[in-house]
Amino acid sequence: MRIPALFSRGEPVFSFEFFQPKNPEDLAAFQATVRKLKDLSPAFVTITYGAAGTAREGTFETAAWIKREAGIETAAHLTCISHTRSEIERIVESFRRLGIENVVALRGDHPKEGPLLPPERRELPYAADLVRFIRARGDFSIAVAGYPEKHPEAPSMEEDLRRLQEKVEAGAEWVITQLFFDNAHYLDFVARARALGVRVPIVPGIMPITSYAQTRKFTQMCGTAIPERILADLAPIAADREKVVAYGIDYAFRQCRELLDRGAPGIHFYTLNRSHSTTAILSRLRDSC
Ligand SMILES: Cc1cc2nc3c(=O)[nH]c(=O)nc-3n(C[C@H](O)[C@H](O)[C@H](O)COP(=O)(O)OP(=O)(O)OC[C@H]3O[C@@H](n4cnc5c(N)ncnc54)[C@H](O)[C@@H]3O)c2cc1C
């Protein structure tokens, strides 16, 4: 099934992001989490491609497994910065073989280890190039990333929004945003994208806070600000994991409720391969509909 069709049904589209476990011995636990989250009937799931140092090997097979065995529509993430055109060609061919119809097309981050290809030798330097490349090779549905607080490398929000527009003009049919904690960023981002003529669904990406230290690490990595009020709320409970998790659920629930009330087409949960917080938030959201 092509995922964009889900957005025209007039109901919020809830989706989950997973990553391929790095160690093969963790695969069974991962599959158990997927089965647990399946009970929440997500509209679709996505599976990352080597994000934050996680595994690449087996990612597409796992995407195909989720689709086939768990019966959930799945989009495979793919990054282009460190692949040649012929490598991407082979990957796209494998999508066809595995029955993957939906792709989240990304540039990827500059590799921290190993030689960094100089820009003039990168064959597909930006996500828009990957979108065009995939679009020219078959009938895939393509999503791209959007940054409510600007991509860290972009010189300005205007420039970054123009890059988003390019990705959509190249053939992307929906956008998933980077995580954020302040809805004002998302609402402003959507308004500015619409003013530029970007009409496709822009789905907010939400990461429930489950750990003070991990939240700080992730937000630093992706250039997301943590509002002062969250830091102040977390400071006295930071060492108490249960309280932090409960706080994260409550915060994300209120954040998602407001986003849906203000027109977001759905919520994409960064599950971090855990089921507890996403289950609690989504159950509360559905009860509040
Ligand atoms: C929803 C989501 C999912 C993700 N999944 C993964 C994953 O699975 N694996 C992974 O490794 N990473 C993942 N990432 C991280 C992503 O790869 C990084 O944020 C990366 O740095 C940028 O990727 P992009 O696709 O947004 O790049 P692009 O859209 O190509 O933009 C990258 C930067 O280049 C600028 N730019 C774009 N085009 C041009 C141009 N023609 N000239 C000059 N500048 C330009 C943009 O403004 C931006 O600053 C994900 C991010 C998000 C939000």
Image (cartoon, rainbow, N blue to C red):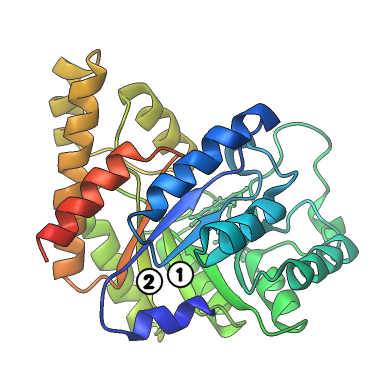
Q: Quadrant of residue 237?
A: top left
Say what secondary structure mark 1 lies in: strand
Residue 126 % position (x, y): 67, 63
Task: Locate residue 289 relative to residue 157 in the image: left or right.
Answer: left
- Would you place residue 119 above or below residue 8 in this image? above
Label 2 neighbour load within 10 Å: few <14, some 14-19, many 20+? many
Residue 32 visible to the viewer: yes
Q: Residue at x 57, y 53 (%)?
A: 47
Residue drawn 20% across the image and 67% down it: 260
Residue 172 locus on image (x, y percent): 55, 78
In the picture, the quarter occupied by the N terminus is bottom right
Q: Quadrant of residue 272?
A: top left
Amino acid under disc 2 = Ile
- Picture layout, residue 286 above or below residue 139: above
Disc ID at residue 202: 2
Residue 196 versus residue 160 in the image, above or below: below
In this rendering, position of residue 225 left or right of residue 128:
left
In the picture, the disc for residue 229 is: none
Mark 1 surroundings within 10 Å by alpha-carbon count, few (fewer than 14), some (14 through 19), many (20 or more): many
Q: Residue furthest right?
A: 86
User: Looking at the image, which is closer to me, 172 or 187?
Assistant: 172
Left or right, 187 with respect to 274, comes to left
> Residue sitting at 40 percent across and 45 percent down?
36
Secondary structure beneath dot 2 equals: strand
Whether the residues at callouts 1 and 2 have beta carbons within 8 Å, the answer is yes
Q: Kindly tell me whether residue 270 is visible in this rendering.
A: no
| Image coords of residue 203 (percent x, y) | 36, 67
Amino acid type, residue under disc 1 in the picture: Val
Quadrant containing ligand 1 reads: bottom right
Residue 175's disc number: 1
